Each structure stands twice: as C-alpha cells, then as structure tokens.
C-alpha cells in the first residue's frame, strides 16, 4: 500500500469512528492535541501515520507493526523526539545490561591503585562473563592525555579496577511519559474517540503534551496521578501488547484499563455507565453473583481482554459500556 493510500485509509477509519460519536462532524481530530483537520491536511503534510509503539519495541512483537493511528505531524514529531526516544534508550540500556554489551558510549574510570587519579575514557563497553571488559570507540570524546595514560597502563600488564558510569542522556521520567503515550494510543487504536474524548482523559493528554514543552523532569512527577501509572512485573512477560479492562472485586479501586507489554504494566482511567457494568460482567461470566465468593478467593479483580481496533469496535459491547446511545444522559455516566 502506498503512503498516500495508507493515510487515506487511516483518515477514513478515524472519521468514520468520529461520526459514530458526533454524526455531523466532518473531519479528523488528532488524539493528542485534539486539533481538527480536513482531508486536505494529508496533501499539506499536516497529518501523518503514527505507530502506537516506537521502532525498537516493534522489533520485539510482530503485531505492533500494524498498530497505527493517525496523528498530526507536530504531535507525532514531538512524541518521537521526547517520550518515544527516551523509552527506547531505556530499553536498549536494559537489554545491553543483560547481554553485557552496554548500550551507548560510556564514561569508564580506570585505576591501577585505589587512591590513584583515575583514567577517564569515553568508549563503548562490553563486559564478559568473567568480568573482563572489552572497550572500543573512536576516542573523539576522550582527552588525549587520558588516552596516553591508558596506553601506559596497558603496557604495565597489571590488573585494573574500573567503574562504568550510567548513560548520561537517559531521562527516566520522560521514558515513563513514552510508555503512557503508547498505552494511551493503544487504547485509542482499540476503542476510538468515545474513549479519548471523554473529559476524564484531559489530564492524561496534558501530561503527554507537557513533555513536548519542557526538560524539567520534576514537572512530570508533579503531573503524575494514581489514575495513570507505570509499573514493572517481577515474574510476568508479555510478548505482544495486551489491553485489559480491570474490574476490582473489593470496590476499593477504580475500574481501569491495563496495558501489558514486555514486563511493563500501564494503567489508564476508564469511564463507564455504572448500571451497564453488570450486563457486561454477566455477558462474559453467567451467574456472576453466584460465583463472586469463589472469584474473590482466587484474586481481587477480574479482567476482560479487549481485542479490537477502531475499525471493528464501533458496535462492540465496550462502546455501549462507555455510553453509546445514551451520551445525553450525563448523570448516568460516571468517570471512575
């Protein structure tokens, strides 16, 4: 499929989804900034296709290649250079630490004796199983004096102690924004505009958009909420992304969306019509109330896997749960 045909296909699927929610709307809305565009924006290159997951993560799962949404060019570029970039750096560092072939050029400090002045090199580092290291690089970021001192140390054929410093350009808070952005886009890819256009998602978008504008990592922490968060599993690993609707059984937690991919768990808020929730549960679990005592013994929540895309979800049970055909009855829709 040509690039233009891909964009037209995405544009049509997005506009069809919008019109199911807002019948008289003629155009496309970027899911991040919520700016509206018409079809001419394709030729003007104002809107483009965006992958839900960045390139390095798509290499880990076959299904992620087809998980695309349309984004305005500005949001796509901003997300790619900020959260996407940092989450990929974070994963490359983790993968490198597992293999010993450390990602990125590192500062390594070498010593013959503990109290000697260290020799500082900026090089690529591979750590072998026996704790021996191999270094490589073009020496451009290493002081010539340190390189000369390193050559002198090597000629002495004596054991060297070393400290490898962390990669200097990793921003963990911004990497977290990247995970939340991808999770948000997967929810959009699966559930469409009825999900993201609810006011309860405004603060998630604000969190994402703020990351486009500032280098201040403390700001991201200030904007974080209990209703959207990133965790890592100790003993679970998901080869492919999975979107779940989580329903707590104790009534103490919010109903939420949960996105699992690799060993990450991302939680997002989910709005629903309360009295329809029982219909959903009993649709999947007949005689749910009779089974509830047993279910509580096996865990504190139940979940349903949402396996759909914007093209197929228009008449799904989740659309009705989010208020399809009863949007005007605002007092029955509760964001939890």
Image (cartoon, rainbow, N blue to C red):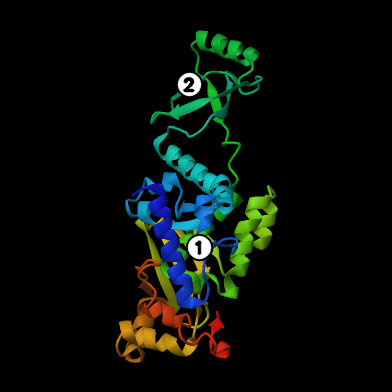
> Is residue 169 visible to us here?
yes
Q: Which residue is mark 1?
A: 184
User: In this picture, is 224 found above or below 59?
Assistant: below
Residue at the image position 45 percent from the left and 76 percent from the top: 20
Q: Which residue is mark 2?
A: 136
Residue 170, percent from left and from top = 58, 42
> Is residue 179 visible to us here?
no
Category of crowding for the residue at label 2, using alpha-carbon neighbours closer than 10 angstroms: few (below 14), some (14–19), many (at least 20): few
Q: Is residue 122 left or right of residue 302?
A: right
6 or 193, nearer to the observer: 6
Category of crowding for the residue at label 1, using alpha-carbon neighbours closer than 10 angstroms: few (below 14), some (14–19), many (at least 20): many
* For marks 1 and 2 on the same chain, the one whose residue lies earlier in the sequence: 2
20 or 32, nearer to the observer: 20
Q: CA distance from mark 1 to mark 2?
A: 40 Å
User: In this picture, is 309 found above or below 144?
Assistant: below
Q: Which mark is residue 284?
A: none
Q: Quadrant of the C terminus?
A: bottom right
């Amino acid at each position: 499929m040509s690039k233009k045909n891909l964009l037209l296909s995405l544009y049509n699927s997005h506009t069809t989804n919008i019109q199911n929610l807002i019948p008289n709307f003629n155009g496309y809305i970027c899911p991040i900034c919520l700016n509206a565009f018409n079809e001419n924006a394709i030729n003007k290159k104002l809107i483009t296709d965006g992958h839900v997951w960045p390139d390095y993560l798509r290499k880990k799962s076959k299904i992620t290649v087809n998980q695309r949404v349309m984004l305005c060019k500005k949001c796509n570029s901003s997300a790619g250079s900020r959260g996407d970039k940092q989450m990929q750096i974070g994963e490359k560092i983790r993968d490198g630490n597992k293999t010993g072939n450390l990602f990125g050029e590192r500062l390594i400090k070498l010593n013959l004796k503990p109290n000697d002045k260290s020799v500082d090199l900026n090089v690529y580092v591979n750590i072998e199983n026996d704790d021996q290291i191999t270094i490589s690089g073009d020496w451009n970021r290493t002081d010539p004096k340190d390189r000369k001192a390193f050559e002198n140390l090597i000629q002495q054929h004596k054991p060297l102690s070393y400290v490898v410093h962390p990669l200097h350009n990793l921003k963990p808070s911004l990497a977290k924004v990247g995970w939340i952005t991808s999770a948000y886009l997967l929810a959009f890819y699966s559930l469409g505009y009825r999900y993201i256009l609810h006011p309860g998602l405004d603060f998630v978008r604000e969190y994402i958009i703020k990351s486009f504008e500032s280098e201040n990592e403390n700001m991201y922490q200030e904007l974080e909420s209990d209703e959207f968060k990133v965790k890592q599993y100790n003993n679970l690993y998901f080869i492919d992304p999975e979107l779940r609707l989580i329903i707590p059984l104790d009534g103490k937690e919010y109903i939420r969306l949960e996105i699992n991919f690799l060993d990450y768990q991302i939680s997002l808020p989910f709005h629903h019509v309360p009295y329809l929730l029982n219909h959903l549960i009993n649709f999947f679990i007949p005689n749910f109330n009779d089974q509830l005592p047993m279910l509580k013994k096996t865990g504190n929540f139940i979940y349903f896997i949402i396996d759909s895309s914007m093209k197929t979800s228009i008449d799904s049970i989740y659309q009705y749960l989010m208020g399809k055909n009863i949007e005007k009855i605002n007092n029955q829709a509760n964001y939890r």
